[in-house]
Image (cartoon, grey):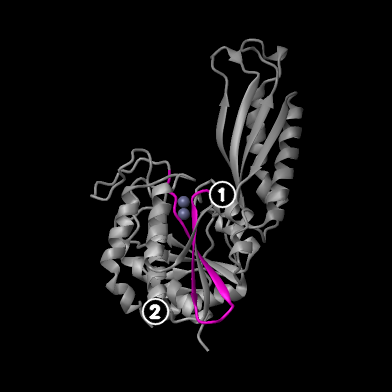
């Protein structure tokens, strides 16, 4: 039980790779430099490379022995549209772009595992190293699946990893079943009849109707969703009117929903529509809902979750693997890969010391200390599942 010594020996180099990627962040489907760097490194390890899946996506394929089993390991490569506030030397060179979700670390971890596995080949079968673009809102995971990822690179299971902000350094957690939420965004257009502020009786006040709609929507979760399910409806914007003496004709309400089950999301959508339309109608106004689904919930498969935790325990010990961790309300497009194939997503603590912040914060930075831990996890996962007979 330990981090793999050959990978620890590579730590300085892995750190340099990670900081180089951090300094050169690229947004959704623009990961040209990053994917080129990934492809060239994989080739230098003697790994067969396929480029251009989902635009900038890259798959590296490594075979050892004669076994016909195969697994997939996935990392994401994209950064966020955010202005970095860190001052260190590897800070973003590109204003308004930043690796604030640690995907620089995920890419480096998978490269580290690939290098070790290509060198040692202590397994029997095939590993596909999947480097996907556009996780942050662009659905790169979905596009890879749609472009035939698993038909071209068949796998019996696929595994992903995300760093966990403000979680103890080098500790793992995950759980079987739902581990990250589905998300949806919505617009509600409330339309009344405009009037002079002094003569409300001559119109239908869209502001008052919208205010009642916002209040009424607070009962969606408490009255329409089972207490055994998790759901969130948040109103995040209200816009309407631009004068003191005019009752506006239209008000825009915007919001966001989260759940761990598609059926719950269906029910939230239907309930929001019914409550908004009828509440607005009570005030002589109309409400029109535009409900847009984001990523589906990320559901870990039970058997593969156990395998993932076993591999993590080989690296950090059972005491530092929480096999029944708390799910996260954020969403992730690795969910599309887990809809297509069995597999599991695991979190690796980025550290919870003084001054640490959450992902998507302009001061976030991936912790280089966990690079060898993550790379060892993927390496052990391969050696364990595709064990030589
Ligand atoms: Zn993110
Ligand atoms: Zn992320």
Tell me if mark 1 has few (under 14), some (14-19) or many (20+) residues whose alpha carbon lies within 10 angstroms of its own.
many
- Reading the image, the residue beneath label 2 is 120
Q: Is residue 173 left or right of residue 231?
A: left
Q: Nearer the viewer, residue 345 or 77?
A: 77
Residue where numbered disc 1 is placed: 139
Quarter of the view holding residue 228: bottom right
- The correct choice, above or below, for 279 with respect to 86 in the image is above
Circle 2 sits in a helix, a strand or a loop, which is it?
Answer: helix
Identify which residue, 39 or 190, lies in the foreground: 39
Residues at marks 1 and 2, CA–CA distance in whole angstroms: 34 Å
The image shows residue 46, relative to residue 222, as above or below, that is below
- Residue in the picture at 33% in, 58% down: 18
Residue 63 lies in the magenta stretch = yes
Disc ID at residue 153: none
Q: Residue 242 in the image: state x and y as whole percent.
A: 54, 17
Instruction: List x then y, in percent, for residue 100.
Output: 39, 50
What kind of element bears circle 1? loop
Magenta residue check for 166: no
Q: Is residue 248 above or below residue 304?
A: above
Q: Magenta segment range?
A: 55-80
* Residues packed near mark 2 inside 10 Å, few (<14), some (14 to 19) or many (20 plus): few
Q: Residue at x 35, y 57 (%)?
A: 366
Of residues 172 and 10, the one drawn nearer to the viewer in this rendering: 10
Q: Is residue 118 visible?
A: yes
Please name which of the two marks, 1 or 2, marks the residue nearer to the observer. Answer: 2
Q: Position of residue 306 (x, y in %)?
A: 55, 76
Residue at position x 31%, y 49% from top? Answer: 23
């Amino acid at each position: 039980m330990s981090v793999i010594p050959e990978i620890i020996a590579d730590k300085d180099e892995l750190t340099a790779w990670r900081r180089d990627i951090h300094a050169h962040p690229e947004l959704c489907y623009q990961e040209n430099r990053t994917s080129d760097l990934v492809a060239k490194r994989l080739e230098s390890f003697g790994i067969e490379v396929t480029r251009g899946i989902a635009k900038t996506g890259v798959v590296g394929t490594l075979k050892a022995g004669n076994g016909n089993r195969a697994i997939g390991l996935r990392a994401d490569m994209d950064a966020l549209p955010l202005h970095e506030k860190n001052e260190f030397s590897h800070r973003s060179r590109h204003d308004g772009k930043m690796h604030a979700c640690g995907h620089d670390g995920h890419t480096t971890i998978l490269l580290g595992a690939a290098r070790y596995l290509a060198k040692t080949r202590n397994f029997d079968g095939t590993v596909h190293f999947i480097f996907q673009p556009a996780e942050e809102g662009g659905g790169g995971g979905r596009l890879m699946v749609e472009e035939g990822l698993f038909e071209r690179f068949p796998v019996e299971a696929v595994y992903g990893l995300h760093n966990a902000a403000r979680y103890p350094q080098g500790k793992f957690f995950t759980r079987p079943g739902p581990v990250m939420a589905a998300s949806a965004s919505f617009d509600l257009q409330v339309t009344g009849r405009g009037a002079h502020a002094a003569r409300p009786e001559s119109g239908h006040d869209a502001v008052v109707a919208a205010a009642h709609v916002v209040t009424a929507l607070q009962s969606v979760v408490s009255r329409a969703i089972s207490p055994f399910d998790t759901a969130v409806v948040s109103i995040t914007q209200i816009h309407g009117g631009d004068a003191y003496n005019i009752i506006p004709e239209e008000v825009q309400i915007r919001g966001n929903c989260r759940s761990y089950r598609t059926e719950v999301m269906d029910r939230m959508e239907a309930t929001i529509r019914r409550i908004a339309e009828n509440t607005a109608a009570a005030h002589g106004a109309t409400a029109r809902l535009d409900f847009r689904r984001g990523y589906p919930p990320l559901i870990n498969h039970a058997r593969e979750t156990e395998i993932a935790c076993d591999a993590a325990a080989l690296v950090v010990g059972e005491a530092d693997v929480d096999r029944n961790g708390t799910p996260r309300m954020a969403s992730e497009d690795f969910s599309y890969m887990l809809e297509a194939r069995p597999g599991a997503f695991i979190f690796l603590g980025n550290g919870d010391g003084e001054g640490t912040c959450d992902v998507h914060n302009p001061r976030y930075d991936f912790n280089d200390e966990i690079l060898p831990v993550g790379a060892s996890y993927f390496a052990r996962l391969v050696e364990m599942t595709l064990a030589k007979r």
